[in-house]
Image: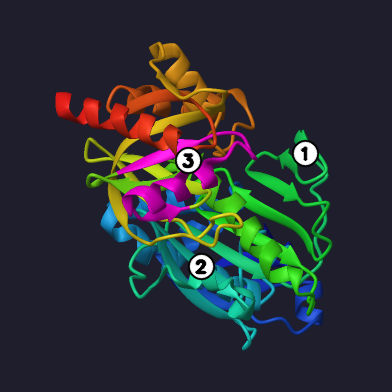
Amino acid sequence: MKTNPVFSLHNIAGTAYLLPHGQGIADHQRGIRLNETGVFLWKTLHHITNYEELLACFAKYCDATAKDLPQLKQDLTDYLDQLFALGILLEEAPFYHPPANPSDCSACFQIGPLHIRLIGPLNYIAAELLSFQTDDTAYTDLTIVLKNTAFSLPEQRFLFIQNPELCVYETADQYVMQFPQMPHITGALISKSGSDAAIYFNKTENESFCTDLFHVIRFLFLYTAQKHSCFVLHSASILYRESVWLFSGHSGMGKSTHTNMWKELYHVPILNGDLNLIAITDGLPMVYGLPWCGTSGIFHTDAYPLGGIILLNQSTHDICIELPMCQKILLTTQRLISPAWNAGMLQCNLDFMTALAKQIQICLLKCTKNDTAVKTVRHWIDQKLERV
């Protein structure tokens, strides 16, 4: 966003006004009276146009605490709304959403410890995500605006990733994503802070659109979750002896077959068939429910203690192999789908797994597709728990 050059700040008998001049007068544009805070923000907008930086300056100016931030963010948004509506600010910011479209709605969701707000036409939201809807709107970690408008790549950008499914670019203050196999989603943006995002799409009745949108929201969530020390492991999960056990392996490795045998043999619940959100909360490793669960259709909305991670590897026999610490960290990090777009993100993933590996059980299960594999790893888990 940038200030409109046909407006200028004037002091009239001790009262501040933003008034049009030149072409602004010719176009019959209106002015606005500002209080002291409005004057500060207007002057700040001349050298800071990034929303997160502007909010940080505003918070410092108000000497705000963390508790004040939700109200402060709302006040700043209301102020920018006014300036945009009057044409005093130009070039809508990527994450700015004017509340003028009557078809747009707002809904909040809690996924693990994170709160997400979606703004836009919510009739496209997947049913799985609706299971996480909440009335708790006091604070939002990530706001995603759904925009049925044109999208164009920023001129100044650096390409991070390019493959048939995803392109990721970096700019000075955000990451930009495109999805070549999703023709109706033209792009997505997320601020580097992870607090604001936008998804651009072409209005469509295509049946695959809701599914595509669901997966794009996942990409944005993964980035914000990492910013809040929450990570997602490609794994199927069961609840056994009051803890969650995650079974991770490459696609086609047989993690669904393995967890289904646990359910058949020992009547344990399967919590998620494909992805699990993990974090260390108040010093304790925890697993949180996710709406994304691959083709299994199995997911949950609860939180449980994490017991351990079992890395699956196909073999002609069944055996649990103890791993050195470096292998525990490396192999589990490689199974994360949390972003590793640059060296800093990769190190963030490694640091988390280093801390996690010190608190949970991790082993490599060389296994067949027979129920003997389940009996083998169950015996290993029982032995570990008895030693605790």
Give the CA distance from mark 3 to mark 2. 19 Å
- Identify residue type, mark 1: Arg
Residue visible at 60% across and 31% down? 340
Mark 1 lies on residue: 157
Residue 88 seen from this side: yes
Q: Nearer the viewer, residue 140 or 12?
A: 140
Dot label at residue 129: 2
Q: Nearer the viewer, residue 191 or 247?
A: 247
Disc 3 or disc 2, which is closer to the eye? 2
Judge the density around disc 3: few (<14), some (14-19), many (≥20) Cα neighbours within 10 Å. Answer: some
Q: Which residues are magenta?
A: 244-272
Name above or below for residue 120 compared with residue 165.
Answer: below
Sequence-wise, which precedes: disc 1 or disc 2? 2
Q: Is residue 40 left or right of residue 30?
A: left
Q: Is residue 328 rendered magenta in the image? A: no
Mark 3 lies on residue: 226
Sequence-wise, which precedes: disc 3 or disc 1? 1
Residue visible at 61% across and 50% down? 219
